[in-house]
Image: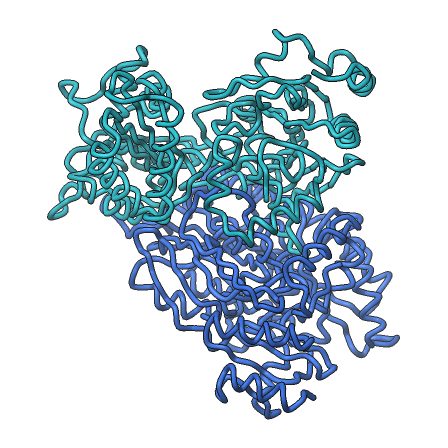
Chain colours: A blue, B cyan
Amino acid sequence: MIAERHKAALVEILGAKGVVEDSAGMAPYENGARYDQGCAALVLRPKNTAEVSACVAYCVREGIPFVPQSGNTGLVSGSTPDASGAQIVLSLDRMTRTFELDADNRSLHVDAGMRLSDINERLAQSGLFFPIDLGADPRIGGMLATNTGGSRFLRYGDVRKNALGLKVVLADEAGTIVDLMSGLRKNNTGVDWKQLFIGTSGAFGIITECELNLERLPRQVSTAYLVPRDGAEIIPLLHLLEERIGSYLSAFEGMSRSAIGAALAHVPSLRNPFQNGDVPAYVILVEISRTWAPREGEQLLDAVLETVLADIWEIEGSPLADAFVGPAHEMWSLRHALSEGAKHAGRLVAFDLSFRRADVQPFCDWMKAELPGRFAGVAILDFGHIGDGGVHFNLVVDETRAGPVDDRFEQQLRDWVYSVAVDQFGGSFSAEHGIGRKNQAYYDLYTQQKNKDLAADLKRLTSPGSVGSVRFG
Amino acid sequence: MIAERHKAALVEILGAKGVVEDSAGMAPYENGARYDQGCAALVLRPKNTAEVSACVAYCVREGIPFVPQSGNTGLVSGSTPDASGAQIVLSLDRMTRTFELDADNRSLHVDAGMRLSDINERLAQSGLFFPIDLGADPRIGGMLATNTGGSRFLRYGDVRKNALGLKVVLADEAGTIVDLMSGLRKNNTGVDWKQLFIGTSGAFGIITECELNLERLPRQVSTAYLVPRDGAEIIPLLHLLEERIGSYLSAFEGMSRSAIGAALAHVPSLRNPFQNGDVPAYVILVEISRTWAPREGEQLLDAVLETVLADIWEIEGSPLADAFVGPAHEMWSLRHALSEGAKHAGRLVAFDLSFRRADVQPFCDWMKAELPGRFAGVAILDFGHIGDGGVHFNLVVDETRAGPVDDRFEQQLRDWVYSVAVDQFGGSFSAEHGIGRKNQAYYDLYTQQKNKDLAADLKRLTSPGSVGSVRFG
């Protein structure tokens, strides 16, 4: 419920097209990609930074809480309104106008509402791309606000490493626009303020424009599935690949048998690529790529990969039990279907964890040994970015299990998994999904008091208004 | 001059070995690498984070200003005391104990006082290295505090991109230790506080330990000198290399004839590598490298580079006028001698600028056209990291010129160059040297008021004590 005078004032700022108030129109903005059914007071759809500023200034002055929303593909309830009906959604989905490519600089100035897929489609003919590879198709503002990582982090890093400049609107009474736009790669002239807004879910300000580092599109890509002799051989295998083919290595992704099984069962378009349909206990998708097209006299990339794998295979006590090179598109389609598979396998309790690289497998092994005794009827469908220590540790609860399957049960499960991951294995409770209502409690629990205090102080200095779904401090 | 009771208290904290008070002993800490002759009240040499904390707490409580100093190789007077004699130097040069390699994670925990060369020597047998390539040999704490970039930024990024975790001592009355140590690559759980301490010269806190991302050492390296047809062809040439050999490209460094000439004249160990000794107007040092050793059936890397350059040479209207592949060590030794050459060429007024990549050459051309008319008797010895937009724009003043050569003249020259670089060409007045007394005035001039205010607020929140040589806000 929102007062008519507020509605009228906001229509005045944005025009009728910029304000959504009917429940059918608001529904897509209220519901999260996986969890959440929130309730919005209103949805605002500004077209540019100036309109964002005007909306924000109005909301802050009038004390109306609001949540910035980008592609709404997040998994931590960072961009959806809560159930109160009091929060406005400030959507960036009409902010798609600016698209200024500086090919010489390998950089791109875009509005925050542009989708990742649109960016890369429009860039394709320039031979450049924005190198963050994700299963979802978010808008760039949200990618910055959560600092997404993805499957090619090993080569290109995360969004933070590829952000050159930002424009930000602070949630203060003026809707102050902070211009941190820059196309410079080297610029050390004081505090790098853009870092404050990256990965903090809009709490310190709303990113409305950005300049991105671009990379050259690979012209050759080869992929293989590798089967390690056992879990302890995964890291030695990664070592060997980093040493023998490191300059080409662009992904090293792990997939457990259970995760693959769920994808094969629930995503009909997939075919089982393994001999006799026998899925190995653990499979690694390795990708290598290079920027140039095949050159005369040079081995094709598939052959390079085959040679390297054959060499590793022949090492005395090789970490490799099996390996086969196959079409990249097909191999990735299984990898990208794992999340969808897990979603359909039962009641999903998902964790986005990260560790030092060598701790991923020990954590998963420990869980496989300990979980059944503590939480019966819960299956582990893990897969992850082994090359950078990330793991999507998905638990699927058999709803026919003895004992309750309710929010309290889920809560106990979450508390326990996070405590093992963070306290026992020194990991992170949010590798690449960022912070939102969904994991706020774990921010509160695992963040040092000094850091919480600083965040609270900084929030007061930058964006004292009620913005976003996270409470810092 | 410092009171005896302070000296006694600090000796109590650090032991006699940790306190230097004789002028011969203090001299190396008082004089900068290129500029500066400061005067220290005392030099403190703590051995570990706890001792740093105790010193800092004492200084803050007693109101004694102090300047943290790492390798003292900086060029902006960021780590030396001023001439007042009131500032203590807090040197990190005894903090070299911790060296914990996690090869599986490709990361290293070290104390802030470890030298870059020591880190890489100790890492060599692991096949890993810390990939920031600099002419100087700083200690790692200072590299973090200035966010150094260097010659292989194009491949590996700057220090910021390779910092996983930090330990920091705040300049407050408790000498609060903030533990931001982490070996995680993906960790999005709120504000990434370490970003605040990177590149800010110690003003917000003193970095005492860190965990660094390591990369795999190249096993093959090839280099070539390229001569572009003219300045306008440098970026097209870079494009072609990024496209045709991008996965191997690790440096694209520009050297002007005047910079090369000064190095050849003043660094006796160099030999002139150009035919008949004729130095071209502009030379690019390109380096490619790959992680693996030569493999049977695979072209050697020198041959790959030769092939690619020959292909580019044959393009209709090729941007290339000449090119030759040569030994990496020799080719780099000229590049690394440019700074030394400039230093001996006359009174040096050095600028560390950066631009969008395509603006580097237009800026230099503009300067070459305009400078003589405004400041007679000043030569331009420019060289730089064209691949990332950085340029070391060195001016050498002929001291026999008509007209004065004094600080006022230098000041006018600086003001004018910075104003052209920043206002006219949208560049940065400090690409990779950071901020110190030397360029404080330009921070004050070119930083937006809102950002200055935020920095001042943040300083009060984190390190209210008088630390470092920069004033933020």
Q: Image quarter for residue B198?
A: top right
- The spot of residue A293 in percent (x, y) is 28, 52
Q: Nearer the viewer, residue A168 or B444?
A: B444
Residue depicted at 56% across the width and 43% down the height = A237
Can residue A317 be seen from the camera position used here? Answer: no
Q: Going by the picture, which residue comes out furthest to the right? A: A403
Q: Nearer the viewer, residue B458 or B154?
A: B458
- The spot of residue A98 in percent (x, y) is 39, 68
Residue depicted at 61% across the width and 45% down the height = B196
Q: Nearer the viewer, residue A18 or A185?
A: A18
User: Is B469 on the left-hand or right-hand side of A464?
Assistant: left
User: Is B277 on the left-hand or right-hand side of B44?
Assistant: left
Residue A192, relative to residue B91: is it above or below? Answer: below
Quarter of the C terminus of chain A within the rendering: bottom right
Q: How many marks?
A: 0
Q: Nearer the viewer, residue B254 or B17?
A: B17
Residue B75, relative to residue A396: is it above or below? Answer: above
Residue A288, relative to residue B42: is it above or below? Answer: below
- The spot of residue B340 in percent (x, y) is 37, 19
Quarter of the N terminus of chain A within the rendering: bottom right
- The spot of residue A355 in percent (x, y) is 67, 49
Can residue A59 be seen from the camera position used here? Answer: yes
Residue depicted at 71% across the width and 56% down the height = A429
